[in-house]
Image (cartoon, rainbow, N blue to C red):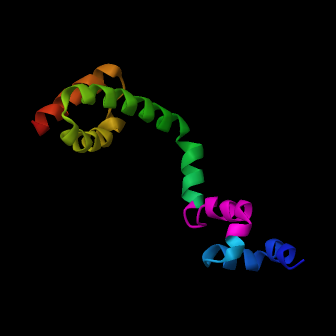
Amino acid sequence: DIDGALSTSPSTKYIVASTPDPLTAASPASADHLQRQPPPSSAPPFSARASSDTFEDDTASVKRMTLCRLCERCFPEEELEEHLKLCAATLALMDTQEDLNEECHILAHHLR
């Protein structure tokens, strides 16, 4: 009965989630559920961005994957991470595969 009362009481849930306690290990499902919830401060901007920029995000991720494959051919592993940071900053300016290839060569010149 005590365990049942603890798992259904909202105020106790937060205490259990924030303090190391045997109850957390005894009820992994409720603990996992609490840990997966984003903090309230980050929830509104994320959901707003996801609904308004879905198309742009998809396009950018396709470009990023293509760009990573191109860069891996040209750059040694130790330079690749820094190069990809520069590439990611320019993705918004690129509209076509030709732009992508041209930008990759420009960035390659900067780092060599």
Nearest to the observer: residue 48 or residue 75 = 75
Q: Residue furthest right?
A: 1
Q: Residue at x 55, y 54 (%)?
A: 46
Circle count: 0
Horizontal arrangement in the rendering, residue 90 relative to residue 3 (left or right): left
- Looking at the rendered image, the quarter that the C terminus falls into is top left
- Looking at the rendered image, the quarter that the N terminus falls into is bottom right
Name the main secondary structure of what is drawn in magenta.
Answer: helix
**Residue 35's spot in the image, x, y percent?**
62, 63
Position of residue 68 relative to residue 26, above or below, is above
Q: Residue at x 65, y 77 (%)?
A: 21
Q: Residue at x 56, y 67 (%)?
A: 41
Nearest to the observer: residue 62 or residue 77 = 77
Q: Find the magenta span and give its range.
A: 25-42
**Residue 28's spot in the image, x, y percent?**
70, 62
Q: Residue at x 49, y 34 (%)?
A: 58
In the rendered image, residue 30 lying in the magenta stretch gets the answer: yes
**Residue 108's spot in the image, x, y percent?**
16, 32
Quarter of the rendering containing residue 32: bottom right
Horizontal arrangement in the rendering, residue 35 relative to residue 13 (left or right): left
Quarter of the rendering containing residue 66: top left
**Residue 24's spot in the image, x, y percent?**
68, 71
Q: Residue furthest top?
A: 98
Quarter of the rendering containing residue 73: top left
Position of residue 27 relative to residue 106, above or below, is below
